Image: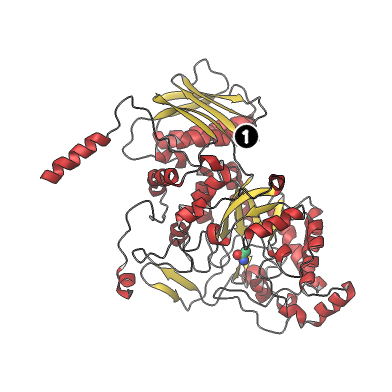
Amino acid sequence: MKNKWLSLLIALCLLPAAGRAVDFVNLTPQPKQMSVKEGALPLTEKFTVCTNKLPDSLAVEAQRFVAAVNAATGLDARVKNRARKALVSMERYEGNDLNAEGYRLDVTPRGVTVQARTSTGFFYAFQTLKKLLPAGVALGKPTPGIATYSLPLVSIVDEPRFAHRGFMLDVARHFFTVEQVKKMIDLMAVYKMNRFHWHLSDDQGWRVEIKKWPRLTSVGSIAPNSFQWDWERGSYYTNAPYGPYFYTQDQLRDVVAYAKERHIEIIPEIDMPGHFVAAMNAYPEFSCTPDAEHNGWLAWGVSTDVMNVANPDAVQFARDILSEIMDVFPYEYVHIGGDECPTTAWESNAQCQEKMKQLGLRHARELQSHFIKDMADFVKLRGRKLIVWNEAITAPHADVELIRQTGATVMCWIGERAAAKKATELGLDNILTPYYFYYINRKQQQDADWMTVAGDGKDDLKRTYNYVPITAETDTADYKHFRGVQGTFWTEHVNDNDLLEYLALPRLMAVAEAGWSPQSAKSFDSFVRRMQADTTLLDLGGYRYSPHYLKPAPPRPAKAAGKQ
Ligand code: ACM
């Protein structure tokens, strides 16, 4: 009885008093500048978003905003070209103090003004407006228990800190459907991330239709067995075929269009010449040992079975693949991997030895540098550029002068700061996705009270959040080559969406905030509070997430508890 009265008293004290200063605006990533006033702007049952005759390419963002708001709230918002009384008004931003993705947003008791220079700027302004409304609005879904809608009175001047705010998903080790991929893209858009790096091939599976080489999917997309993990059983092999699992080119184009509406560019990755076993399972003639078995891998690790880069037919095979990849993905960058490529197969292959002699190479690693240069020259014919993992410049004996000539962007994951520094010294752009902080497939922690999942790691949310991409030691002259940050998700141990989301969320939002917000606007305590509030959004969207920092620990499943 006593406790009941005490709880009531505490609850009454915590009730927000009318007119009290607003101390919490739930916006992630944190805007560059934001001021908040007391009060709110109610959304009326019918309201107008006026485009002020802006061209259709910009006005379309208002249409999408209105569609999401109406679906989520049941209100009747309309877009008009001209209106005497509009609740939301779009204006072209004439200043030049914001980058192309930037926007201004003013919510006053009289209405809302959104200003931007580009469609992307307007898109982010409307994403912010949606995020300021009840949780479901950001996803275009109703929020149960909410019947009226109002906006806090904010004045925001915002632009992203970095151009690349990425998420990588490996669909080669385990496959994720178009619907699952779109679900992650939806979340990227909520948190203003703009690059989806799609890791489409690896030793364990080939996931993209290449019309000229059909065995890549008819053979390369099937594994004879599959490693799985689930909440009840832990780790096990199914002892059953896995696949065929791949995307048709039409499906890929559909995802490209879906992401484009959300201002997300897709960076396709075809990993070569290492991590290429699935392709050589389909076409053994392009390996260094054409007569041997090249069964797709079932576990994890690094295979010594790599493409024969001295075979002109294998090099043409790689060009054919990239050619179709460029047909499907319209963007500037194509990622060709280049990580974890042992040279042992080349060292004992007559064709590779011969090529080394011809070119006067002293180390087999230089063959890889020549291969990357060849691919860079090929994609350049269509105005494209490469992204490569950092081994392209950091592996001992790599020919960095050749890589410098490619103009490739270097994705830095292992020894990331030294790799980024080296890329910068070569005049190459770089992106940070550090293994120990931003590999968001790694386990979040190893606390015995928490569920154990497959794989390794203990990079909890705080560690990921507190990684500082540009440190005080970074030379400001180097900034121009620093493109941004990325959360990277490998799926050797992750076979379903449930586990993917549990591991990735909310660390992905920590990376999103590092990519968008100025370092000075960041605070882990504030982030946790915002993520706690966003559990409503995640629950409404059917996302699973790690409750660490957000909610009390869930009970351990019986099997895992019994193991202790
Ligand atoms: C990588 O993690 N092998 C890029």
Q: Give the residue furthest to the left.
A: 1
Q: Is residue 488 above or below residue 369?
A: above
List x then y, in percent, for residue 374: 81, 63
Ligand 1 located in image quadrant: bottom right
Q: Is residue 337 above or below residue 302?
A: above
List x then y, in percent, for residue 499: 44, 62
Q: Nearer the viewer, residue 180 or 483?
A: 483
Q: Quadrant of residue 61?
A: top right
Q: Nearer the viewer, residue 219 or 99?
A: 99
Which residue is pictured at 37% across the width and 27% down the height?
21
Q: Is residue 261 above or below residue 328?
A: above
Neighbourhood count class around disc 1 (C-alpha, 10 Å): few under 14, some 14–19, many 20 upward: many
Which residue is pictured at 54% across the width and 70% down the height?
243
Element class at badge 1 = helix
* Residue type, mark 1 in image: Ser
List x then y, in percent, for residue 229: 44, 70
Q: Is residue 277 above or below residue 256?
A: below
Q: Quadrant of the N terminus?
A: top left
Q: Quadrant of the C terminus?
A: bottom left
Q: Nearer the viewer, residue 55 or 197?
A: 197
- Does residue 43 show up? no
Q: Is residue 351 left or right of residue 209?
A: right
Which residue is pictured at 75% across the width and 58% down the height?
323
Which residue is pictured at 69% across the width and 48% down the height?
475
Q: Which residue is under mark 1? A: 119
Q: Is residue 101 left or right of residue 112?
A: right
List x then y, in percent, for residue 558: 29, 69
- Does residue 384 show up? yes
Q: Give the residue furthest to the top.
A: 84
Color encoding of the figure: secondary structure
Q: Is residue 367 left or right of residue 244?
A: right
